[in-house]
Amino acid sequence: MKKKSKKFLFRRIVAVLFIVLLIFGIRKVGYYFWCNNQKKDVRILLNHEMVSLINHVYVKDSILYVSQEDIKKMFDETIDYDSEDEKLITTCNKHIAVLDLNENYMLLNDVSFPMKGKLQEMNAKLYLPLSDLETVYDIEVMYSEKTNIAMIDSTNKAKKQVIALKNAKIKASKLPFAITIEKVKRGDKLESLEQNGKYQKVRTAYGNIGYIPIKHISEEEILRDDFPEDKTEIHILEGYSDITKSYNTIEKSIEKEENVLIDDFTINKDSKLEQKIDEESKNYKVYYHWTQENNLGIFGNVKIDVSDSFSDYEKRNRIINEIYYSVMKKYYRGICIDIEKIEDTDSFYRFLIEITPRFRESGLKVIVKCNSQMEQEKVKNIVDFVLL
């Protein structure tokens, strides 16, 4: 009976081991086929997260082409294409870019830059050469042909690195017997994502994300710190807008960035910029000196009641340039857009979308006085500050 019992136990152990090995084998084969299936299409890893794409992504001559719909989803909700002029306008933070269909250049903040790729139509959809637009969207783009993964990282987010101290395996998880997703060699550089117990979550040069024992890697090296957005509250002091008056030293809040607002600009019926204040006048020079002594910023008020001024990009851009260069000459800290009445609200929103990054690039701010025709939350998401 004892011999039979031992044989039965031995067979049970062998059977269990066989089933375990079979499960691991099936899992490994399944993972292999899943990976091969995934490699058929270009995938995008945006800030270490896989993006669910609307359209296919193409790689042509080492240029990554992404559809307008997917760019809108990832970077610019307000991206706009003018089919008549065949121009695409896209903005992000401090940048506004204009791309002409089938042209190998773009206007970036009104300066011409060559591109290796070009805006083009593929499968009845517009595609942007994302590899050429790193500066526009504040990103860095890398592509691995081996895994068919495009890695896109925001340059305003922190970046850390570790180095493999020996040949090691990158595992899919921290669990025992986890699948190996990639093997790395001693000296390979890995992007460090987070420490998790005895393991470090990393991203390899091929875009694979997994876990490696901490004992197999070097200490973290910070390559780049987080670059937070400027969310300083803008405060306008009332009662100091008349540049012909003399003012004494004032009591300022140390918690807020104090500014004064003066009425200067008007967009007239001919869509021309009119200025009330001459920066060379004695009154302005005295006033400007007083603001500097009191560490005050000056905002120029822009009154607009002619919505036809914003009907197309060329008109908007001409007005933006006129305001921008006038503001720079007078050392204003920014502008306050004062709208009395709008007939074409969509064109006005486009004006705000396009003027804000242009001003931000030079450290200038855009304020808007909202009226009842405007969606306050929508305007808040475009400009730096809203006055009610």
Image (tube, rainbow, N blue to C red):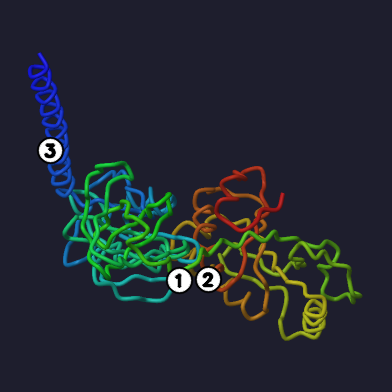
Asked if the residues shown at circle 2 and circle 1 are in contact, with their CB atoms under 8 angstroms apart, the answer is yes
Q: Is residue 69 visible?
A: no
Amino acid type, callout 1: Asn
Question: Badge 2 is on which residue?
Answer: 361
Which residue is painted at 26% across and 54% down in the image? 170
Q: Are marks 3 and 1 in contact (CB under 8 Å)?
A: no
The local secondary structure at tag 3 comes to helix
Q: Are marks 3 and 2 in contact (CB under 8 Å)?
A: no
Q: Is residue 361 above or below residue 58?
A: below
Q: Earlier in the sequence, mark 3 or mark 1?
A: 3
Where in the figure is residue 240, as x and y percent of width and height? Answer: 84, 67
Q: Furthest residue to the top?
A: 1
Question: Which residue is denoted by mark 1 in the rendering?
Answer: 109
From the image, tell me which residue sits under label 3. 25
Q: Residue furthest front?
A: 2
Residue drawn at x 63%, y 81% is: 329
SS at mark 2?
loop
Residue 269, located in which quarter of the rendered image? bottom right
In which quadrant of the rendered image does the N terminus lie?
A: top left
Spot occupied by residue 171 in the image (x, y as percentages of width and height)? 27, 49
